[in-house]
């Protein structure tokens, strides 16, 4: 989708149905950090060009069976901690160069997350251009469960992208397709160091803490 097309969509003048991808950056970062036991290196940061190609393929498949043209729309929602703009800007610019729209919101309080903004955006598309498909990327995504089930009940294909360790609700919900992020081709340069309780090595494995013990003092 071109910048002009996106501007038309925001203004409500576009009419082409969308296969909408909504990426919950804070939540996906937290889920990935939990798997890695720390901040990801370049080898374990998601490649959004690969994600974009996956969305294009998904849109083409949906469009082939649709009576009218369908377009993809890729969006990333993120918080910006005060003072971090210079660090985050290259990542935001890279996303925009790939073709993703970015909604950035200051992280001023614990309550200033982007969940409500993502849900509002989904509802905007649902009631303006219309949804030919919906993909939500969120490591746990519990805040999306009821809205996604409601959209799926309308006959819209709904997909959740996440990590199987953290999204058991999506894995076990038949109305929703679950896709593990690592199963998308070329999203990671190297395999994630994942340890599953269902497939432990015979000699056992260490499971690293999700956060430092000192966090209990905060």
Image (cartoon, rainbow, N blue to C red):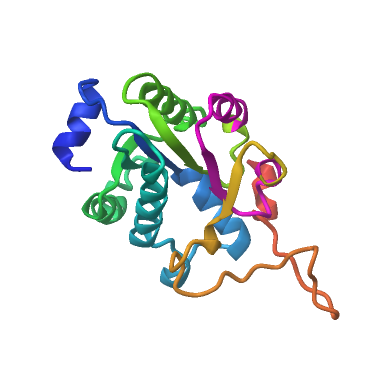
Q: Is residue 179 left or right of residue 46?
A: right
User: Going 43% across and 31% down the picture, which residue do you hit?
Assistant: 118
Residue toward you, 163 or 73: 73
Q: Would you say residue 150 sits in the magenta stretch?
A: yes
Residue toward you, 161 or 132: 132
Q: Quadrant of the image for the C terminus?
A: top right
For residue 176, say whether it is visible: yes
User: Going 44% across and 32% down the picture, which residue do you hit?
Assistant: 114
- Classify residue 150 by image quadrant: top right
- Classify residue 2 by image quadrant: top left
Look at the picture and state if 193 lies above or below 146.
below
- Residue 108 pos. (x, y %): 41, 31
Look at the picture and state if 211 lies above or below 194.
above
Residue toward you, 152 or 190: 152
User: Going 51% across and 49% down the picture, which residue do you hit?
Assistant: 28
Q: Would you say residue 41 sits in the magenta stretch?
A: no
Residue at the extreme left: 4
Q: What's the magenta region?
A: 145-170
Look at the picture and state if 5 lies above or below 185.
above
Q: Quadrant of the image for the N terminus?
A: top left
For residue 80, say whether it is visible: no
- Classify residue 70 by image quadrant: top left
User: Going 20% across and 21% down the picture, which residue do you hit?
Assistant: 13
- Residue 10 pos. (x, y %): 25, 26
Residue at the extreme bottom: 203
- Residue 32 pos. (x, y %): 55, 57
Residue toward you, 116 or 86: 116
């Amino acid at each position: 989708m071109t910048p002009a097309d996106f501007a038309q969509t925001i203004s409500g003048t576009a009419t082409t149905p969308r296969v909408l991808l909504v990426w919950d950056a804070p939540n996906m970062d937290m889920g990935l950090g939990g798997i890695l036991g720390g901040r990801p290196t370049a080898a374990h940061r998601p490649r959004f060009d690969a994600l974009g190609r996956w969305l294009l393929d998904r849109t083409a498949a949906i469009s082939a069976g649709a009576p009218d043209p369908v377009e993809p729309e890729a969006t990333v929602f993120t918080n910006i901690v005060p003072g971090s703009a210079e660090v985050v800007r290259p990542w935001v610019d890279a996303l925009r160069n790939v073709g993703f729209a970015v909604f950035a919101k200051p992280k001023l309080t614990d309550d200033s997350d982007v969940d409500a903004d993502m849900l509002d955006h989904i509802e905007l598309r649902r009631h303006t251009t219309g949804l030919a498909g919906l993909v939500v990327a969120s490591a746990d995504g519990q805040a999306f469960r009821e809205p996604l089930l409601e959209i799926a009940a309308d006959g819209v294909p709904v997909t959740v992208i996440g990590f199987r360790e953290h999204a058991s609700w999506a894995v076990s919900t038949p109305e929703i397709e679950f896709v593990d992020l690592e199963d998308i081709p070329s999203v990671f340069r190297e395999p994630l160091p994942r340890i599953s309780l269902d497939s432990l090595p015979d000699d056992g494995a260490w499971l690293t803490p999700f956060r430092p013990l000192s966090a209990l003092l905060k």
